[in-house]
Image (cartoon, rainbow, N blue to C red):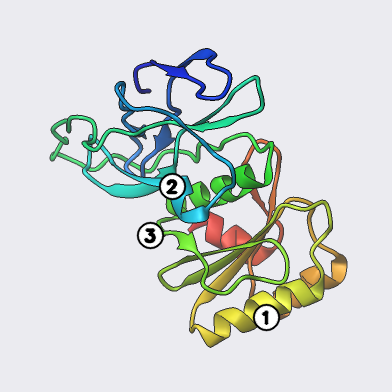
């Protein structure tokens, strides 16, 4: 966990004490964006995907990955983007005797659609996929994520995914010669599950703790592998 920094809202001038959350690296070590104590927070007027992530290097193994940009909600309603230091935290010397086993997945609570996307990105990194980014093609519903050889769709709505949703994801992945996986907050219709089994699409349901739950045997295999 990073040290707390004082943050003043540029709109209402209210002071806050903020500490960036930590995220689990693939090696199991906690990673947190290094905050700039001299930086000035900026008010977020609208969310831009590319600006919502920051590259942070793990202090233990040296892996660099994209993590959510630190943000704070002020009581006046303003969302503040917290400044991140240009240099990462000091690196610790890794233990070269043996690599630590992969730790259990550490989820984040889902309260918003963005939380659902962040939880999915964390889970995909836990599975071993790197360089997760916004997909080039926007899906008919939800949000698309992409990694090397993988296309994922995140549906944070309260509507259960339909066979058409599954088919569209599968067709898009086929055109990109990639595997695909579907994450839904509300679950799937019976027809959608049948369609996914026929097309070979793993299905996950996101519970509110942020932990993806396998919804078919293909997802079970992916989660266990």
Q: Are marks 2 and 1 in contact (CB under 8 Å)?
A: no
Query: What is the count of numbered marks?
Result: 3
Residue 142 place in picture, x, y as percent: 69, 61
Label 3 secondary element: loop
In the foreground, 122 or 74: 74
Q: Residue at x 14, y 39 (%)?
A: 97
Task: Check disc 3 and report the residue beneath it.
Answer: 131
Label 2 secondary element: strand
Q: Residue at x 43, y 31 (%)?
A: 82
Label 1 secondary element: helix
How far apart, in angstroms, are the residues tagged by discs 2 and 3?
12 Å
Q: Earlier in the sequence, mark 2 or mark 3?
A: 2
Q: Are marks 1 and 3 in contact (CB under 8 Å)?
A: no
Q: Earlier in the sequence, mark 2 or mark 1?
A: 2
Task: Check disc 2 and report the residue beneath it.
Answer: 53
Q: Say which of marks 1 and 3 sits in front.
A: 3
- The relative height of residue 67 versus residue 124 in the rendered view (above or below) is above
Task: Check disc 1 and report the residue beneath it.
Answer: 199
């Amino acid at each position: 966990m990073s040290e707390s920094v004082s943050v003043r809202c540029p709109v209402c001038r209210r002071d806050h004490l903020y500490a960036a959350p930590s995220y689990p690296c693939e090696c199991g070590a906690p990673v947190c964006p290094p905050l700039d104590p001299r930086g000035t927070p900026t008010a977020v007027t609208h969310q831009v995907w590319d600006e919502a992530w920051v590259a942070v290097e793990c202090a233990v193994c040296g892996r660099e990955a994209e993590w959510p940009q630190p943000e704070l909600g002020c009581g006046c309603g303003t969302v503040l983007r917290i400044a991140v230091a240009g240099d990462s935290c000091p690196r610790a010397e890794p233990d070269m005797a043996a690599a630590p086993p992969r730790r259990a997945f550490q989820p984040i609570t889902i309260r918003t659609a963005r939380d659902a996307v962040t939880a999915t990105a964390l889970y995909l990194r836990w599975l071993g996929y790197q360089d997760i980014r916004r997909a080039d093609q926007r899906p008919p519903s939800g949000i698309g994520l992409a990694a090397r050889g993988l296309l994922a769709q995140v549906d944070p709505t309260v509507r259960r995914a339909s066979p058409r949703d599954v088919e569209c994801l599968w067709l898009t992945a086929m055109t990109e010669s990639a595997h695909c996986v579907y994450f839904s907050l509300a679950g799937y219709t019976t027809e959608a599950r049948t369609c996914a089994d026929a097309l070979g699409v793993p299905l996950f349901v996101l519970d509110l703790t942020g932990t993806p739950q396998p919804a078919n045997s293909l997802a079970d295999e992916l989660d266990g592998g």
